Image: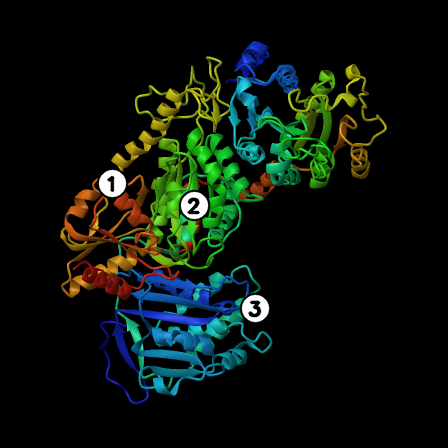
Amino acid sequence: MSATAEVERKPLTKKELAADKPTWCPGCGDFSVLALYFKLLQNRGLHHEKFATVAGIGCSSRFPYFVQAHGAHYIHGRALPFATGIAVSRQDLDVFVFGGDGDAFSIGGNHFNHCARKNVNLTYCVMDNNVYGLTKKQTSPTSPIGFKSKTDMWGAIDKPINPMQQAISAGATFVARTTHTNPKHLLSMMEAAMDHKGFAFIECLSECTEFYDGAFDSSNPRKGGEFKEISEDHDPTDENAAYALAEELVPGYFGVYYQISRPTKQDKEAEVNSKFLEKTKGMEDWEILQQNFNKMK
Amino acid sequence: MSDSSTADEVVSEKPKVSKIHEAVIRIAGNSQDGIQSIGGFLARLAGRSEQEVMTFMTIPSTISGGPSIFQVRLSSGEVLTSGDEADVLMAFYQHSYDNHVDFVKEGGVILYDTSHVEPREDLQEKFRHIGCPITSLTVEAIGGTAKDKGKNIFALGLVARMFDLDSTRIEGLITERFKGKPESVTETALSAFHAGHGYPLTTLAEIYEFEDPKARDTEQVVCTGNEALAYGILAAGVRYGAAYPITPWSDIMELLRRELPKYNGIFVQAEDEIAAVSIAIGASWGGRCAVTGSSGPGIALKSEAIGWAVMAEIPLLVIDVQRGGPSTGMPTNVEQSDLNIACFGGHGDSPRVVIAPSSVEDCFYTAIEAVNIARKYSTPVIILTDQAIATRIEAFGMPNLKEVCQDISPDLSPRDDHKPYDLSSADGITQHVAPGTFIKSGKYPVVTGLEHNEMGHPSGSPKMHTDMTAKRRSKLQALGRELPKPEVFGPEEGNVLMVGWGSTQGSLREATERARKTGDSISSLTIRHINPLPEGLEDIFSGFNHVFVVENNDENLYGYGQLCALLRARYCDKKIQGINKADALTWRVKDVLDRVKSKLEENK
């Protein structure tokens, strides 16, 4: 598309963005994440050819089918490395990754840490429902101790992951928590994450009405809970303060726990490349390779 | 040293000079002695002297220490293997002597370090022993502290003297090698070389001179299989990749990591094998076929993701540099036991392309071929090499890089409409448009591991699963019809056809030549395309009474190696039989012929 044509194009409508009808259960928190993703794309005027939507496996990971755009539904737990591949090789695209708590913190736990430390420039939204929903109620890595599931019929016994603390300690440069019950807050977190340069991680509490009904009621004013927003006094560049804030058990506080500026994976690779590109400037690819072959004569 | 003929008369003090056609030199020591670099220098020298060369090495899978050998075969004619027997053994230690003396040809030369080796009395008649205080002379030449350093270069000097090699060229290679290091390093190395070269080999009755090699049309380059493959990947236009280190694959990822920045590419060292393959698939989805690689254990870890790429029909290049298995197995040894996982290691019905290059040169061109197949058929392609081919050094003609290098940048031009998994397309082959492509219809495809409809959206329809499964299969059947029919080495009719794949090609060809010289009716065939198989193999097989599939793997439960089992399943022909060994060493020519003979006996 030429630059002039882009200027004239209007933001996509919701109709233009919607694809398959979501297969989620009625009342599922993921609906609101999808709706606000559309809103985000509209607000930012992102057209179909400007972004990619990637997910792994799980209820929430069905996401790409519901978005009318270039999307990939990859294997369980590996959405982040897949997204890394697209994010480093196609830096012209905004890359959004969606998944659940099993995908992010259990089977894909290793990738979560490494993607954070590498500070790959992408947005990762984890819809955390504290339970395995697609496979019908097994314990998830974020299920609280005592949660009764089909794999812990007497109540979960393993200490749950603390996603905020894990992300901070792994080196993520944007760490935030939000909830599906507060759409305004959810959208603002998505916008902040998208604006952030680097690995932006949002944990969105997203209730599973089928298998963990009421999990986050204590943070929902409509259910008699309290939506505790992070105080304006909190300094998001203070790693220790962010870590301490995350001590509070889920649902805990909402907002940006931690945000710092650090060169992204893409930046660092470009820095390495620039030194070499100075030397190969103006050369055809085969001429560069010929230099190697000449050394093997 | 074959075809040895005396050129000069023996002069009283001077050793006689013999013209030789070829020589096999085995250098045995410990892994930290720099044995590989002596071999490397000799191989490079041969390449520049228009000679043929092939090397073989073993290294322990420890970080430092442990016995190691490097064998180099230099020839003025064609070289197919690194040689069954050595003409010269250079032994640095007692264990080097004891373990390798049996490998020396009767009448061969054993050059040993008198500081460490006590030669056996009973072998004095059988071999010509030449002692040289390698260690102490090296210390003398280059100074005392680093006792064993420089010994390799001293030994190189000795070899250069013995074979009357071009010492000016070697000096040039040494200088090149240490370029960028402090000058003193080069000087020390040259001192060690001169000390070795100047050592009076008084007990040596002969020095050898290679016959002039046949003049060649093209310049030669000399490199390992791993290097050739990595450069082939660059020539193919691949600019993104990811991997996790594992022996013997790591050389390739290190080279790609080092070279890709020159092309503004990125090679990512991933946190694990699964991340590596996933990053590569993600980059491939981005529109430019990407690469990942590993060895057996890592390929096992990547299997689920490769299955996804089969299902989503994404082009992908996967390299498997095989080693001894299963599990951690023998990381620094050769084995051809990943054919099954490469062809059949997927869950579900997941056909993929498998190609096995059969020489160092073939590694280079196979990389390009594989990338083009991956793109044309929108499929993962696995290149199966092995430790032997990966670490072996060979000389081959300089490729015409201007001609073979290709640009595979994604085409992001807008489309009116696009249906990636179109069941009614003329050739039946899926083609993706990369993310970032504007599609006027406003209908965008999804790529997925779920069974899907023509737009990539999930489908649970039995008919759709049937049609899509057939689509994924039939495109590879189409590829099979396009593949060239392999050529028989030797006559196309006869008693025995030895069939092999990958690194055994040289052994089988040399065995064929040797057998034919003694009147045995033996031919050989290399199958490069393992999956799908090329058409026409049954015609080739019909020309022979026996088809013996010689492999570097176990005969398994039913007596057939991995390729053999595949060929038997494909052709249901009883005359296809297996000749296998799983000692994690390359096939010696003599052993191949002995086993063919005994197999023929069994069949009587």
Residue type at mark 1: give it.
Pro
Q: Residues within 10 Å of mark 3 (few under 14, many from 20)?
A: few
Q: Is residue B334 visible?
A: yes
Residue under the image location 29 percent in, 33 percent down: B477
Compare residues B258 and B209 and report the one nearer the observer.
Answer: B258
Residue to which mark 3 is pinned = B184
Residue type at mark 3: give it.
Ser
Q: Secondary structure at mark 1?
A: loop
Q: Residues within 10 Å of mark 2 (few under 14, many from 20)?
A: many
Residue under the image location 37 percent in, 46 percent down: B340
Colour option used: rainbow
If you read the primary sequence from the N terminus, does the residue marked by circle 3 or circle 1 appear first? 3
CA–CA distance between discs 3 and 1? 54 Å
Q: Is residue B200 visible?
A: no
Label 1 chain ID: B
In the picture shown, does residue B93 fall above or below A6? below
Q: Residue B580's spot in the image, x, y percent?
A: 31, 57
Quadrant for residue A213, please give it.
Answer: top right
Please determine if labels 2 and 1 lie on a single subunit.
yes
Q: Secondary structure at mark 3?
A: helix
Quadrant for residue B572, please give it.
Answer: top left
Q: Looking at the image, do the residues carrying marks 3 and 1 touch, with CB atoms under 8 Å apart? A: no
Q: Nearer the viewer, mark 3 or mark 1?
A: 1
Residue type at mark 2: give it.
Ile
Residue to which mark 2 is pinned = B319
If you read the primary sequence from the N terminus, does the residue marked by circle 3 or circle 2 appear first? 3
Assign the C terminus of chain A to one quadrant of the image.
bottom left
Q: Looking at the image, do the residues carrying marks 2 and 1 touch, with CB atoms under 8 Å apart? A: no
